[in-house]
Image: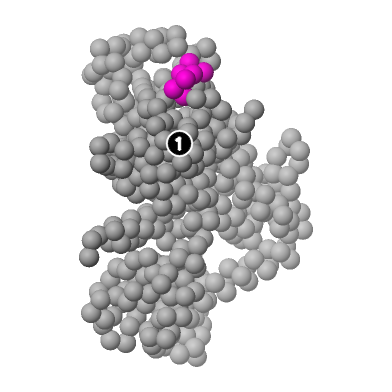
Amino acid sequence: MTDEIVAIRALSRNFGSTVALGDVTLSVVRGTVFGLVGENGAGKTTLIKHVLGLYRAEQGQVSVFGLDPVGDPAGVLGRIGYLSEDRDLPEWMRVGELMSYTRAFYPGWDDRLARDLLEMFELDTGRKVRTLSRGQRARAGLLVAVAHRPELLLLDEPSSGLDPGARMDILAAIVRTVADEGRTVLLSSHLLHEVQRVADRVAMLHRGQLLLNEPLDDLLARHRALTIRFATAPTAPPSWPGALGWTGQGVEWTCLCNGEGTSCKQFAEEAGAEVVEERAPSLEEIFLACTRKEASGSKPS
Amino acid sequence: MQLRITDQDGVPIYVQVVRQIKYLVSSGRLAPGAQLPPVRKLAEQLLINPNTVARAYRELESEGLVISRQGAGVFVADGVSPLARREQQRLLAERIDVLLTEARHMKVDVEALIEMIRRRSEGFDSRTS
């Protein structure tokens, strides 16, 4: 049994002249939560469609549970629980019908778990999917995604546009999935505070390129936010190596830097400026600094 | 045991769990012999990754603050008082550093600061009781 649940090797995909994925390599390990982050259109959904076997790898390889998701859809899809932002559920079905319909596809369907979730989510089996609120529709989608105890739970922007209660239910489902020995979650999201709560590893896609792919705690540990007070207000923040981005005005600026900020502290000292605050930036701050830096770096000058 | 996890800054969550449990032990809110919640339960309660909770518990165990008994659970170790005292001093030193930094920015010297602490301390019991 392989511990590499999803293996993506040098995967590239173009749509016309647009690079949707450019030479992406990553692997999702059993028993962990893998957070895939990036702006809208960064390539997250394209990547997930390859994992589901909806796209064939034109360049590079994709394997899931060691199998080819296009060549062996039955062997792969039956072991995946999938919930997407559109929650494309059959509108005309009642919740009870949706459950028995989905149940037929999965030998591992757990009636007891399904009943527990139904109760926890306060879903009415007689209601038509069409008439459910946004949050209840997401809960119905979540129920049918997890009730067969999938080995891989695949969530594509599951929390978009949901109220805090429904978002918490989704986070709780992620936590329960990993707590069950050996099960795995691949979560794509632009809600970075949620990713920061649950991810073991984070990969950042930007215009189809993988900017980062590392354990979340390592990523957080090697970035610092330094607030620097200059003797006189600079017209523009300095471009120090290691400084990913600046926010501020006047004499006080906050610099997001990598490498624990040592080089930036040295530059500050040389410039006669004082570091007045140092703290650990959130995943969201790191993400914004990285994507802005990439965007400005690739701009034609 | 009530912990509060924040995702608004970048302090890794296992570090937050370790620090807060140490704080609860050194302040006496978690007594020697007290059982910590199972990994899964704490993860579900705080909505954080169970691997993160397990890592925090391992860290606490390697520092001798808790012991894990096979099949029974994780417990606050006996005789942690010297360690707890060290932890108390570390925690207070951290707060003092913050205070000193702010005082320096406000150009309040150390003597004046100590005098302020003494005066605050005199009225402290009547204010908080």
Q: Residue at x 31, y 26 (%)?
A: A87
Q: Secondary structure at mark 1?
A: strand
- Is A72 one of the magenta-colored residues? yes
Which residue does the image show at 34% across and 66% down from the upper left? A245
Name the residue tied to disc 1: A60
Q: Residues within 10 Å of mark 1 (few under 14, many from 20)?
A: some
Q: Quadrant of the C terminus of chain A?
A: bottom left
| A162 shown above or below B66 | above
- Residue at x-position 34% and y-position 49%: A206
Q: Indicate the chain on which mark 1 is placed.
A: A
Q: Position of residue A236 (x, y in %)?
A: 25, 76
* Magenta span of residues: A69-75
Q: Which quadrant is the N terminus of chain A positioned in?
A: top right
Q: Amino acid at mark 1?
A: Gly
Does residue A297 belong to the magenta stretch?
Answer: no
Answer with left or right where residue A300 lies relative to residue A277.
left
Question: In this view of the protein, which residue sits in the foreground, B92 or A19?
Answer: A19
Q: Is residue A158 above or below residue A150?
A: below
Pick the residue in front: A274 or A188: A188
- Residue A1 shows in the view: yes
Residue A250 picture quarter = bottom left
- Between B119 and A134, the residue placed more toward the observer is A134
Please state the horizontal and vertical placement of residue A4, each as a whole percent of the image: 57, 35
